[in-house]
Amino acid sequence: AAAKILDGVAIAKDMKDEVKAEIEGFVAEGRRPPNLCVIQVGEDPASKAYVTNKIKACKYTGITSEKIVLPVETTEEHLLSLIKEKSDSDEVDGLLVQLPVPKHITERKVCNAVHPSKDVDGFNIINIGKFCSDQKSFVPATPAGVMEILRRSGIETFGKNAVVCGRSKNVGMPLAMLLHADGVYETKAGDATTTICHRYTPPEQLKLFTKTADILVVAVGIPGLITADMVKEGVAVIDIGINRVKDEKTGKMKLVGDVDFEGVSKVAGHITPVPGGVGPITVAMLMKNTLTAYKKEITFE
Ligand code: ADP
């Protein structure tokens, strides 16, 4: 049996079209459209590409955007004062600083400087705290997007076994939160029995865990970590890895995930491709978060 491929581009388009339609409604009522401010420090090529994609999605959905590119030697003090200025501006609904920031700047300070009501990345400690106590909050776009893929593809999480490989603060951890927590609360979490694997999961044991998964999410950064022998028949596999590798045949660079797509797609029930899986959905989710910020749907007293 061949897995059904979860088309991230198509799902992302649906999500963006919904955001676009809602914004058109507000604009028709005479309101200004939502606005997103994106701050990039330095010229890291991957960061540049992500920022470009975000600005493009803003244009598509009708969100006005401002992209601010600061030189790599920008001081922490200057960055924090700019964040404060944008946090205080009535013209700005969503505000994010593209990570990673240069080493001389403390990431945690940057995340906490963004006002929680504009923190569309969900990296401010107030949002993390709310989120971890099952309250409505801004949730990081990648994990929120993964839940959206599952929901829109009719993949049930309630009472299922979910395995998350990777425990980063921006992806693996919040995703495990969303999968395991109680669906009756504001975060509408997945009620799955959830296992987190990470770099200290002994390699020979990783398979014992992944084999139990009805839903397997991989955010590790190791191409081909998950192979066909490690998964259960019918599993839904969500591959968050984005790895740049050299194509053996053509010698050109290409993007691959953390899952051996060719092998695993013969066993899985559903699988996301890389590229064209989680990536576009993350961007669409950011648009949705920006609309949420604009609508002031989450309260911070
Ligand atoms: P991302 O931002 O996509 O989550 P990171 O590079 O921040 O990626 O995190 C990688 C994660 O992968 C870490 O949590 C690390 O513990 C986990 N990891 C690394 N190697 C393995 C492995 N062999 N098996 C499972 N998890 C691993």
Image: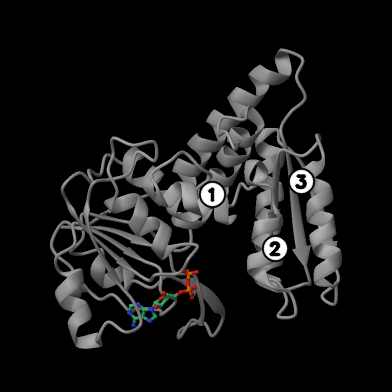
For the question of whether residue 140 can be seen, the reply is no
Give the quarter of the figure containing the C terminus: top right
Q: Is residue 39 left or right of residue 283?
A: right
Q: Residue furthest front?
A: 301
Q: Identify residue for label 2.
A: 110
Three-letter code, disc 3: Ser
Q: Which residue is mark 1?
A: 127
Residue visible at 16% across and 56% down in the picture: 234
Please provide percent x and percent y for residue 60.
67, 38
Q: Is residue 167 above or below residue 184?
A: below
Is the residue marked by circle 2 packed among few (<14), some (14-19), or many (20+) residues within 10 Å?
Answer: many
Mark closest to the chain's N terminus, 3 or 1: 3
Query: Residue extending furthest top?
Result: 29
Q: What's the residue type where badge 2 is placed?
A: Val
Q: Secondary structure at mark 3?
A: helix
Q: Quadrant of residue 206?
A: bottom left
Mark 1 or mark 2: which comes first in sequence? 2
Q: Where the N terminus falls, by quadrant?
A: bottom left
- Kindly check if marks 1 and 2 are in contact, taking CB atoms under 8 A apart as contact: no
Give the spatial CA distance, label 3 vs label 1: 15 Å
Quarter of the rendering containing residue 57: top right
